[in-house]
Amino acid sequence: MEKKPKPGTLCVQAGWRPKKGEPRILPIYQSTTFKYETSEQMAKLFDLEEAGYFYTRLQNPTNDAVASKIAALEGGVGAMLTSSGQAAAFYSIFNICSAGDHVVSASAIYGGTFNLFSVTLKKLGIEVTFIDQDSSDEEILKAFRPNTKALFGETIANPAGSVLDIERMARIAHSQGVPLIVDNTFATPVNCRPFEWGADIVIHSTTKYMDGHATSVGGVVVDSGNFDWDAQAEKFPGLTTPDDSYHGLTYTKSFGRAAYHIKATVQLMRDLGSIQAPENAFLLNLGLETLHLRMPCHCTNAQAVAEFLQKDSRVAWVHYCGLPGDKYYALAQKYLPNGGSGVLTFGLKGGRDLSIRFMDSLKLAAIVTHVADARTSVLHPASHTHRQLSDEQLVAAGVTPDLIRFSVGIEDLEDILSDISQALDAATK
Ligand code: PLP
């Protein structure tokens, strides 16, 4: 049997396999549509009797090559690129939930996902109960109801930095007959592959480390192929009963282990759009080619920044799962032995005002909404990404008023540290 390539090889080579005379580099198929010889050929595609491209809102060869690279990296059976990470989170849930259904989610998640879950899904009749992911199995199980369809969490929460006990969460989800959906954006498959710990669906904001250069907003939904939808047929009728919009085809019968991501593509993408632009997929692919080189550098730099801040008497606290003594150190050792991410949080003695003065004094690190790309950047979540949240919701999301989110880039470490040092001096003088 052919040896399975290592992640670094998959980053560079997976997805696009050119045949004789084809371009070595993945082309951008900048075309909305695809040509056929006969009307019948096209009709078969519309009936899902044959696989093939017909309209880029559903599928495009550039996107598919990149999606299959990410599926290979995560160890899944297939994936679907979306126009943003938000769309990926929405589709991952909406593919198996409809009005009247319920989801259990960790409360320590990205603010945008929190809004999506608590405001927009509610308008669609899908209710989400938020749980403390560190509470006991018994506490978490109390949140489940007969109509619960999924458990959701982030491998490393943005910005709280909490590390999800994926194996335990998968066990809890499966005991209730539902899949575990994990947002693996911060860890990336280079540092953690949630399917290996029992997760069923993985999503990413590819906007972050996967692109890595802050060029393109995008997302992906990856299917492990491991969840047995038919074993819970009454819970997931969308996958296990006939779809009238495809002449009564049943996804699990027709596509087996690929049912979840094929339904997401041929039904949700068809009806709701939000496909990633092929040009963005091309840029994402360029980013992926160096993901295995960039992630270790982000993690080494972040570890050094965390240790540097911890030693400074003007710093009140530092959260980074790579610091011995951090609340999530033990979980990080289990799930992220090669490093977590480049993102850490800290607060200064002097609270919110000093935190803001410090940020305004940084020269190399830029104040941007973005996080997790090559350039060091900084943000004050309570004033920016999480400003819609109430004080109570802020606490549940792990965001204190003084919290600075520092996204350590891959610049020279010495320059990053001296920027922090001069900004601390300027803010406290
Ligand atoms: N998930 C996480 C962990 C994020 O950090 C973000 C954005 O910051 C998202 C999802 C949403 O992704 P996007 O901004 O690509 O829509």
Image (tube, helix red, strand yellow):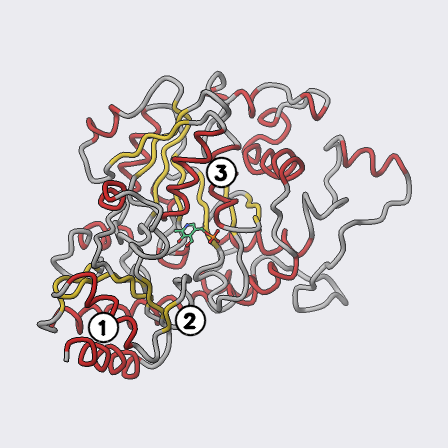
Q: Which mark is residue 19?
A: none
Residue assigned mark 3: 92
398 or 296: which is nearer to us?
398
13 lies above or below 45 = below
The residue under the point 22% across, 60% down is 320
Q: Is residue 421 above or below residue 340?
A: below
Residue hosting label 1: 304
Residue 164 position, x and y percent, is: 28, 45
C-alpha gap between disc 3 and disc 2: 28 Å
Given the image, on which type of amino acid does mark 2 rest? Answer: Ala
Q: Secondary structure at mark 1?
A: helix
Q: Are marks 3 and 1 in contact (CB under 8 Å)?
A: no
Q: Which residue is mark 2?
A: 374
Tell me what residue is drawn at x 28 percent, y 71 percent: 359
The disc labelled 3 sits on which kind of residue?
A: Ser
Lower position in the chain sequence, tag 3 or tag 2: 3
**Residue depicted at x 71% and y 48%:** 56
Q: Nearer the viewer, residue 16 or 267?
A: 267
**SS state under label 3:** helix
Q: What amino acid is found at the position of numbered circle 1 in the picture?
A: Ala
